[in-house]
Image (tube, rainbow, N blue to C red):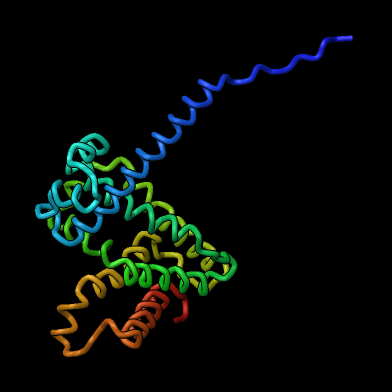
Amino acid sequence: MTAKTTPPRASPVRRTAAKRTGVREQAAQTTRDNILRAATKVFARYGYEGGSVEKISLSAKSFDRMIYYYFGSKEGLFIEVLEEMYRRMNDAELKLDLDLEQPVESLKEVIRFVVTYYSKNPEFITLLNTENLHRGKHISKSMRAREYSSPAIAIIRQLLESGVRQGVFRADVSARNVYLLIAATGYFYISNRHTLSAFLGEDLQTPEAMGEWLAFITSTVLRTVMQTP
């Protein structure tokens, strides 16, 4: 008979050290997340120039040195803020329950998602406006920006291909252009809603106005891609 062996137990000292390490890692992640959230609000309110390290650390209830420790620089932090905004939209988009066999209805759902997301996340629009003022010099340094745009275009490409197979969509329309059409019309409306409301003499932020614009965008996109609009 072979003697039964009992696996060695971790010593109390080792278990305590591991626990302390886990607590420190969690605290570090919490600090980092707090800085990122604070930076998002500060940059959205004051822009890149006005969003100082001091304002961000104060908002995060942290210290300036922690920003440099986790992000390297103010620019590094701003790039991560932009990446995080793109990632959040990408993650939300991937949760859409789309049926490739119903390309028309699914494309409508994509349009509805994009317009609604812009409306519910005005900080995203403000940050993009800020970065465009800087000619995209910060986001161009991102190693992850492109990977966040690929799924959105891929989804539209799959829907267009399905529609072509079913004979309802044109074969000469690119997914890239459809994506830009949806993004441009949704983005422009939300980005310029305040000045347009003053210029047109009506509140473009009411549910009725937003619903009318969504219906118009949907009609425009479908007329572009369908064989017989």
Residue pictured at 39% horizontal, 34% vertical = 24
Residue 125 occupies quadrant: bottom left
Relative vertical location of residue 25 with respect to residue 139 in this rendering, above or below: above
The image quadrant where one finds the N terminus is top right
Residue 30 percent across, percent down from the top left: 36, 44
Picture layout, residue 128 above or below residue 188: above
Image coordinates for residue 123, horizontal then vertical, percent: 26, 63
Dividing the picture into quadrants, the one containing residue 130 is bottom left
**Residue 90 at x, y = what percent?**
41, 56
Camera-side residue: 197 or 11?
A: 11
34 or 181, nearer to the observer: 34
- Identified at 44% across, 60% down, the residue is 92
Q: Residue at x 21, y 63 (%)?
A: 126
Q: Give 8 or 35, whichever is nearer the viewer.
A: 8
144 sits left or right of 1 in the view: left
Q: Outermost residue, left direction?
A: 49
Res. 158 visible in picture: yes
Q: Residue at x 55, y 22 (%)?
A: 12
Quarter of the picture holding the C terminus: bottom left
Extreme-front residue of the structure: 12
Is 49 placed left or right of 131 in the picture? left
Q: Farthest right residue? A: 1
Q: Quadrant of residue 122?
A: bottom left
18 to the left or right of 48: right
Tell me where residue 226 appears, x and y as whole percent: 45, 75
